[in-house]
Image: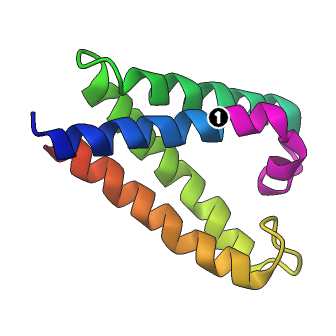
Amino acid sequence: MKKAKLVLIFLFGAVMIFAGISHFLKPAMFFPFIPDFLPQAAINYMAGLLEIAVGASTFVPRFRPLAVLGILVLMLLFLPLHVIDVFKEKPAIGSHQAALVRLPIQFVLIAWAWFIYKK
């Protein structure tokens, strides 16, 4: 495997682990994304655990394909939340400009996961 691809994989895993840890360090930051009818704390912590698990699994070659596929699915599941956020009166991200910046980032993460998975 080429070094550049390994760097992308490990960087992606680290990003996911950092994002997962953020769910535990700043849970209130994620609550506005979670629909009110769901248990916000439970969903937030489960999402954090999933992000940590799939991020860490990218470092293990045996689990990497499944981990990256898991990240791809998570990013696709989170996409509607970011689209909705763009149109909210008070976006979870903080401002409409920030929500508009965050949405393309979600597409970059999806493309990144797809690129790694397809290789």
Q: Is residue 18 above or below residue 52?
A: below
Label 1 crowd bin: few (<14), some (14–19), many (20+), radius 10 Å: many
Residue at numbered disc 1 = 20
Q: Residue furthest bottom?
A: 97
Q: Is residue 39 visible?
A: no
Residue visible at 35% across and 23% down in the picture: 59
Residue visible at 36% across and 35% down in the picture: 10
* Residue 68 placement (x, y as % from top left): 34, 36
Is 26 situated left or right of 99 in this image?
right
* Residue 101 placement (x, y as % from top left): 61, 77
* Residue 12 placement (x, y as % from top left): 41, 43
Looking at the rendering, the stretch of residues picked out in magenta corresponds to 21-38
Is 99 situated left or right of 32 in this image?
left
Q: Is residue 29 on the magenta stretch?
A: yes
Dot 1: what SS?
helix
Q: Mark 1 is on which residue type?
A: Gly
